[in-house]
Image (cartoon, rainbow, N blue to C red):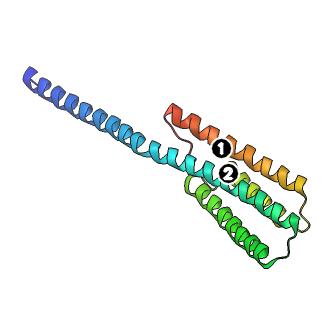
Amino acid sequence: MSILEITSILSAVTALLALSVSSIVTLRVTRRGTLSPLKHKWADDFRDAIAEYQGCATQLGIAFSLRRTSEEDQRQTVTLGSRFAFLERRLALLASLMLTPETEDFKKFLSAVSKVYKTVLARPSNADTVRKAQDDLTVLAVSILRKEYVALYRGRSLL
């Protein structure tokens, strides 16, 4: 083999290697740049949905404890109950979109959401039990979101 042939082969291998590395780097940067805003949006939506769910749970608990009998009060309670059920399903959907269903966090989260739902709708409702269930859900949600924000900050998401 002549020097010219060796140089040609080395040039071709170098070009192929440079193209491969460049493609991989571009793909990772593009992927990170596209997914990161989506994950930030999911985290924001997740946080907002949890806050809305917790607020609705509190309102519904108060409505049940007041035991108002007017038709308008009952209609508002039914509307609030429907909203509460919708928000429970929304939280489950948001969790299933971005958390891996096999993970312990996902299972604990769905269980905590369900526990809040059941304790609010339980008759007679116990305010301390509802508050404890809400606190447990909040602590778990904060833990999940903290993990996600740390992972996003480091450039690799857990979701």
- Rendering coords of residue 133 (x, y %): 81, 53
Is disc 1 surrounded by few (<14), some (14 to 19) or many (20+) residues within 10 Å? some
Among numbered discs 2 and 1, the one appearing first in the sequence: 2
Q: Is residue 67 left or right of residue 49?
A: right
Label 1 secondary element: helix
- Note whether residue 106 is visible: yes
User: Which of the labelled discs sits on residue 144, or is there none?
Assistant: 1
Which residue is the extreme one toward the bottom? 71
Residue 13 found in image quarter: top left
Residue drawn at point x = 70 percent, y = 49 percent: 104
Q: Secondary structure at mark 2?
A: helix
User: Mark 2 and mark 1: span between their CA atoms?
Assistant: 14 Å
How many circles with numbers are drawn on the protein? 2
In the foreground, 60 or 86 = 60
Q: Residue 102's quadrant in the figure? A: bottom right
Residue at (37, 37) in percent of width and height = 29
- Amino acid type for the residue under numbered disc 2: Ala
Question: In the rendered view, would you say 29 is above or below 62?
Answer: above
- Compared to 106, does 68 lie above or below? below
Q: Residues within 10 Å of mark 2 (few under 14, many from 20)?
A: few
